[in-house]
Amino acid sequence: MARASTRPTSRDVAQAAGVSQAAVSLVLGEKWRGRVSEATADRVREAARDLGYRPNLAARNLRLGRTRTVLLVVPALTTEFFAGVYTGAARVASAHGFGVVLYPSPAGIGPARDPFGSARAALDGVIASSMAADALTAIRGDQLPLVMLDSDPAGSLGAATVNLDIRDGVRQVADHLLALGHRRFLHLGADIASWTFEVRARELAARLEAVPGTRLRTARAPISIEHSRAAAETALSAPGPRPTALVCDDDNLAAGAYKAARRLGLRVPDDLSITGLDDLALARALDPELTTVRLDAELFGERGMEALLAVLDGRTPPEGDIPVELVVRGSTAPPR
């Protein structure tokens, strides 16, 4: 009868590498620098690789006092953008032996206010969108290592922040429309109290104010196609010269604006240019396809997770906003 194979231990690695078990722990725990030589570290890693050794994560986590679990707090689970954020965060987390739990904020469609009883007892850290920040107090997530996404660096509870370069995205939209010759603008803003949407409104107003002869009106709506259709239809039907360009905070708002234009007998882009922000799959399903700002949601999630890992390790997370890109499609043209 064949003898069952046994799982290699740190002692086996130590014997194969000709070092002590303490040296193996230092090397595989990435704490060897200044304590063992680089040649010794290479020898230990090679022995572990040859033996197929895998550390006992449960025992190591118990010693470290970690659960190796991170909470990602998002506004809702039904949003394509935040699905991408989760995918990116989970990919980086998995590479470092962490798991990611999704928690939609109470304003979304999620579970009870506190899914853990005590977040501090069940989690190592939290990544949260500014649009879901209210959930942090409910689950006491603000008392854990924290990274805020899409948040004001000056007012994020002292947490690390990771941001997309939304200001530049809005500047790219404004400059594109101005170069086409547009001077009458309607801003269809998201009716959500959030730093990221405040930035969009301020940046658009500032950019247009710098160009003589421009006019800017604003309408707001919840992020839904039907709400944005109603808001855009009302704004475009108001007395006075009709805007020739409609700048939307989100691709879903832009889809509602398309419906409003059609109801009013306006053609896109002949009578009305429309832009979005996100570059969701919806942007390519509209006809004509939507000019919008591409936000790399998966990279956003990756950077958020990398920042949290840095915080957990006592390192300073990398600085600098994530670049965004204007994607010009068929929904924008010079005004008639």
Image (tube, grey):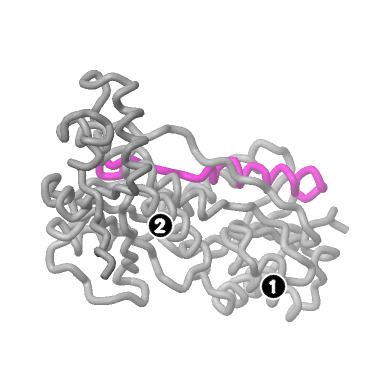
Query: Left or right of 305: which side holds 250?
Result: right
Circle 1 is placed at which residue position?
237
Residue drawn at the location 49% of the way across and 47% of the way down: 199
Pick whichever, 287 or 225, lies toward us.
287
* Residue 193 visible somewhere in the drawing: yes
Residue drawn at the location 16% of the way across and 30% of the way down: 20
Vertical order, 163 against 123 (above or below): above
* Residue 158 visible somewhere in the drawing: no
Total marks shown come to 2
Quick one: which residue is furthest to the right in this view? 336
Disc 2: CA contacts within 10 A as few (<14), some (14-19) or many (>=20): many
Pick whichever, 255 or 301, lies toward us.
301
Q: CA distance from mark 2 to mark 1?
A: 46 Å
Q: Position of residue 37 (x, y in %)?
A: 28, 19
Vertical order, 6 against 20 (above or below): below
N-term-proximal mark, 2 vs 1 = 2
Q: Is residue 308 one of those drawn in magenta?
A: no
- Tell me where the magenta segment starts and ends, as one range: 155-182
Residue drawn at the location 43% of the way across and 32% of the way down: 319
Of helix, strand and loop, which one carries label 2?
Answer: helix
Q: Position of residue 223 (x, y in %)?
A: 51, 69
Query: Left or right of 89: which side holds 133?
Result: left
Pick whichever, 9 or 270, lies toward us.
9
Quarter of the image that includes the N terminus:
bottom left
Q: Is residue 171 one of those drawn in magenta?
A: yes
Circle 2 is placed at which residue position?
90
Type of amino acid under label 2: Ala
Query: Left or right of 85: which side holds 18?
Result: left
Type of amino acid under label 1: Ser
